[in-house]
Image: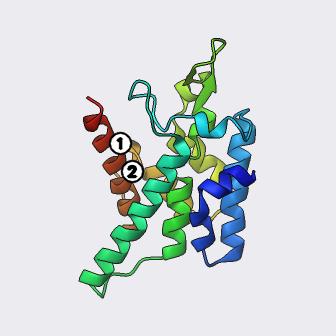
Amino acid sequence: MEKVWEKIRLTEEISDLQLREKVKRCFEEAILRGGWSEDEVDEIPFTLLIPDCPVSLLEHTVAVTEIAIKSAETVKSMYPEFEYNRDILIAGAILHDVGKFLEYARSDDGKIVKSFFGKILRHPFSGAALAYEMRLPDEVVHIIAVHAHEGDNGYRTPEAIIINKADFITFETLREFLK
């Protein structure tokens, strides 16, 4: 999956080598379980809610990760007492939408649509379950589970708050821009 990791170079910023490898394995496992080839991965839009979305899931993943890192660094510079785990933040940002590889499928006419599985189980749940199965830290599983609206009424760690906001910055800005 070299093409994937060429696009998501930010995995190299995870200093804990064991965590970095688990993140990569989880991402690759989701791609395989979703039935996607390495060449197809960059064709997957990050959302089906924006018709003909011009941003791929990989591009969105990079954008959310970069926004999350910069946001956490900015908060830390303004409030030195603010504590966060940079490796957990990056791992959670990279994996926040990993369940979309299971939520989406290619239809018979070649379009990318919600899979049957995706219709009954949204990506925060499938992504969190996969990350748990692959023994990622509980903090990363938490970020995946609560990054979308499903987590709005529950507790979010500081890292999860940052990733939730970074995700919606990208989604809502692009949706408005493409109107």
Residue type, numbered disc 1: Phe
Residue at 67% x, 51% y is 4
* Residue lying at the far top of the rendered structure: 109
Task: For label 1, count other residues whose C-alpha is less than 10 Å away and answer few (under 14), some (14-19) or many (20+).
Answer: some
Q: Which residue is mark 2?
A: 167
- Secondary structure under the numbered disc 1 in the rendered image: helix
- Secondary structure under the numbered disc 2 in the rendered image: helix
Return the x and y of residue 102 as percentages of the image width and height: 63, 35
Return the x and y of residue 153 as percentages of the image width and height: 32, 49
Residue type, numbered disc 2: Asp
Q: Can see residue 4?
A: yes
Residue at 65% x, 39% y is 41
Residue at 61% x, 78% y is 15
Q: Which residue is mark 1?
A: 171
Q: CA distance from mark 2 to mark 1?
A: 6 Å
Residue 157: image quadrant is bottom left
